[in-house]
Image (spheres, helix red, strand yellow):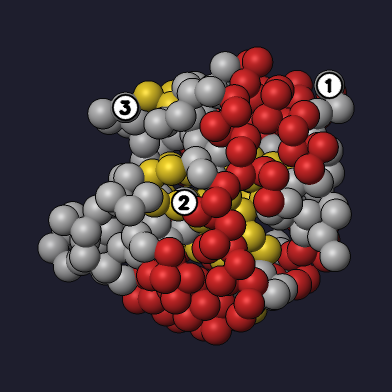
Amino acid sequence: MNKELIVNFTPTGMIPTKETNPNVPISENEIIDDVIEANELGITCVHLHARDEKGHSTFKAELYGRIIAGIKKHCPDLVLGVSLSGRDFHEFEKRSEVLSLGVDLGSLTLSSLNFPKQASLNSPEMIMALCQKMNETGTNPELEVFDLGMINYSKYLIEKGLIQNPLYYNIILGNISGLQLNASHIGSAIADLPSGALWSLGGIGSTQLSANSIAIAIGGGVRVGIEDNIYYDQGRKELTTNMNLLRRIHRLADEFERKIMKSKAFGELGFYNKFRN
């Protein structure tokens, strides 16, 4: 068991809107304010999605840059991750543009997959190109896993020298075409990870609380935030805020006597950008 709990904060995502949950941070200032408040409460790293002036997801480094600058002004030690998602943007130039900012983590989904209403396209060529670009920019991959094949593909990337230790995986449960919230799926995924890898469990929708609780109980980390879950309750009646989700994680961590891993400690394990000053 890792005594310290990794809390990977996912405040915005690509899907939640003000219509579905008015508490989702969309504007630059809203995202900055939520991350600063979360950092004061206690998180380990943040996984950022930027939105344009219409609230749509964007790949633009200019917009990400303003958000990152605002966060760094108040949270200089925070490990900052960004999305390189293949849901909305399929060209390498768009997906990799944000890496020019020298971010600490870049999400790397390890295969194509289907969500309920949309596909995330991640060809072998795209995955390898993103790995190469992250190696050039000093960015560490935030390895996103939705099924066992993705874990196996990460081992192929290790053999090719495209990714290397330290390794951090998000195992995301509850997607219709992936790993589900049950003991056999969770146990198989964790057992199949490379030796020494750090990992967190995330859950989509109503699976988030159970996934986080299991991870806290068995020594993993958590991925938590409105990106994956807009409700606070399992019955999906009470819309949540990011802070309410995080405060619950802190209460659960206290019950299991697990301290939140400081961001600086996580960064110094090797998850800061390799060229960070």
Q: Nearer the viewer, mark 3 or mark 1?
A: 3
Left or right of 65 in this view: 10: left
Is residue 266 among the parts visible in the rendering? yes
Name the residue beneath numbered marker 3. 118
In space, the residues marked 3 and 2 are separated at their CA atoms by: 17 Å
Q: Position of residue 262 (x, y in %)?
A: 69, 75
Name the residue beneath numbered marker 2. 49
Name the residue beneath numbered marker 1. 160
- Furthest-left residue in this view: 237
Left or right of 208 in this view: 125: right
Q: Residues within 10 Å of mark 3 (few under 14, many from 20)?
A: few
User: Looking at the rendering, which quadrant does residue 12 occupy?
Assistant: bottom left
State the residue at coordinates (82%, 60%): 276
Residue type indicated by callout 2: His
Residue type indicated by callout 3: Gln
Q: Secondary structure at mark 1?
A: loop
In space, the residues marked 3 and 1 are separated at their CA atoms by: 30 Å
Residue type indicated by callout 1: Lys
Q: Position of residue 174 (x, y in %)?
A: 37, 41
Name the N-terminal-most of marks 3 and 2: 2
**In the depicted view, which residue is nearer to us: 187 or 48?**
48
Q: Position of residue 210 (x, y in %)?
A: 39, 57
State the residue at coordinates (38%, 70%): 30
